[in-house]
Amino acid sequence: MRAENYFINGVINKYMSHLKKSKEDRLKELGGVLSKGQSAYLTNKARGGSSGRKGTRYEDHFSGYTLARILANEGKAAEPENWPNIYEQVFSFVDDLVVESEEGATYYQLKNVAALTWQGSDHPLELDFELQKKVSDAFGEKETKLVLVTSDENVAKKMWEGMPSAIASYTAIEHFPYYVSLNRLAIEFEPLRAVVSSLARTGSKVTDDEIGYTLSAFVSSFMHGNGSSSVAELLKFAQGISPALVRLFPHQIADLKLKDEFIKVLAEIPNFAYCYKYGFFDWSCSLDSGVLPYNCLDKQFEAFQNRIINARPTSFEDLEDLLL
Amino acid sequence: MSQFAPHEARKYTEFADKDTVARQLVDVIADSSITVQRYRDTMVELGRALASKFILKIDKFSTDDLFVICTVEDADFLARGVIEQLDLSGLGNRIKLMCMWNESVQDEGISLSPVLRQYREEPTSTKASFIVVKSIISGACVVKTNLTRAISSSDPQQVFVVSPVLYVGAQERLALEFPPKIAEKFEYYWFATDSNKSGEDVVPGIGGRVYERLGFGNEANKNKFTPQIVRQRRKLQGAYALAATG
């Protein structure tokens, strides 16, 4: 376990749950809950999960989407220390992804397959879900939700209709398509478009390519982590990519103020409009538009403001080379 | 025998086989010894040659917009050649220029080309065809980004993907990035397919990195520049706007 996971910009994250415990400690605590066979199965399942981590792109895409959903829902209001934690490949029966918040934990099992059943195979999904609930209860989780995520819409429908009654009260089904390309996912999957648009760096109408690279930044943030991260930490990775691709949040730009002289100079340029509500200088002037490659908290932005103030452009033609 | 000998490793397309001048032009830009000015002039020529191939597929009686979509480094050269040829064919009044300034991001296996700036002329028709112009298409990352930006505001009737050189597999890579209903509209016009690489550079390709060969210096420098064609057309667009309101 890495202690630094609990620290985000000097803030101690409040969730230090059983999910962060070592495999050995978890097994020990579950001694009376699981049979020998179930413990052995769990150990083997986790091994398979770890070795299958590399190249599991469906999982990567869903992780990025999950991070975006959390930030879209909670990022604008809550303080970072209240944001959830995300764990990949947890030592659990439902193990692909876990989101842990103050309200409880949501476990996701991802299936990028064309056919699936609850009861098939040596280790039926139904049993995995039942055992997961048992383990979560044993660890005293406030509320446990289990979600089966499938890439095939028909499989999702079939699994919903055939859901065993024993797990129905705590289980949900979600459809999340798989395309090799994140760009195509960003163009095609409407629920994702709505979420990721709100996290893009541009304040004006968000274009499809912006959605694609904002999503890519979130997916990429998981590649930096060690499988167990706070949302704030993942956001830090996503926002650290250069040129910056993810908006800043209200708590990050609470003190952001443009220089008065800078505002005055820009006001003199006909048709020039700009927005920095999302922490980026996003501008347009008639047929031209753009966004600076760094955010407004970056030292480069202060230098940019100074360049404008010193040059005092009075037309877009004078200004445009300063915007690059 | 020509100074610019054909490259054994490259495969020439049917378009090049039927046009010996175009075939020679695509070999000229692969030569790393030619001057910046010759390289620039050759890119303009290649733009004209490529346009002369796909122009036959454009309905001359239509009034649909023809969006020429290019990068900042290609605007004054390859794209200018395409635009000049369209203009010569009587299609000038339908041309709309969309020029983009792309930056490069490489992070943990993810390769992106985010748009930092764009110049986009207003559509005058509800229907449009896209002419995506790029000096070389290899990983297809820039073309993917710029085409994605373009389809954000318009559903094209036709999409011509135009480049002197493609790296083998570029068409398949680009198609994977889009829904089939968009990808099935792609029509490629190019003169040579290369299958060798030295690091990130296609060999012989276009003789190195296009922004260096065109005299922009490095990748960052090419984004600090506003193409002449953008300045010229912006002025004209302003004039049209004034005429329309006046």
Image (spheres, coloured by chain):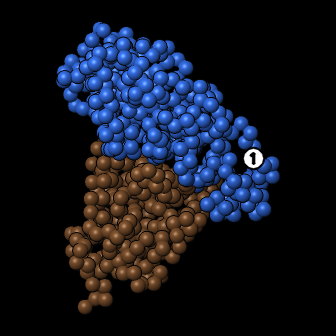
Chain colours: A blue, B brown
Q: Residue furthest left?
A: A121
Regarding residue B236, the answer to whether it shows in the image is no
Mark 1 falls within which chain? A
Please tell me which residue lies in front, B140 or A139: A139
Residue B1 seen in the figure: yes
Please determine whether, in this image, residue A204 is positioned above or below residue A299: above
- Residue at position x 65%, y 33% from top? A11
Which corner quadrant of the image does residue B198 belong to?
bottom left
Image position, residue B122 (x, y; %): 52, 52
Where residue A22 appears, x then y in whole percent?
44, 29
Towards the viewer: B6 or A218: A218
Residue depicted at 59% across the width and 53% down the height: A293
In the picture shown, does residue B138 fall above or below A120? below
Question: Which secondary structure, mark 1?
Answer: loop
- Crowd band around label 1 with a 10 angstrom C-alpha radius: few (<14), some (14–19), many (20+): few
A111 to the left or right of A264: left
Name the quadrant of the C terminus of chain A: bottom right
Where residue A151 appears, x then y in whole percent?
Answer: 30, 31
Q: Residue B233's quadrant in the figure? A: bottom right
Q: Position of residue A24 (x, y in %)?
A: 40, 27
* Residue matched to label 1: A258
- Can you name the residue that lies furthest to the bottom here? B1
Residue B206 vertical position relative to residue B125 in the rendered view, above or below: below
Residue type at mark 1: give it. Answer: Leu
The residue lying at 45 percent from left, 61 percent from top is: B70
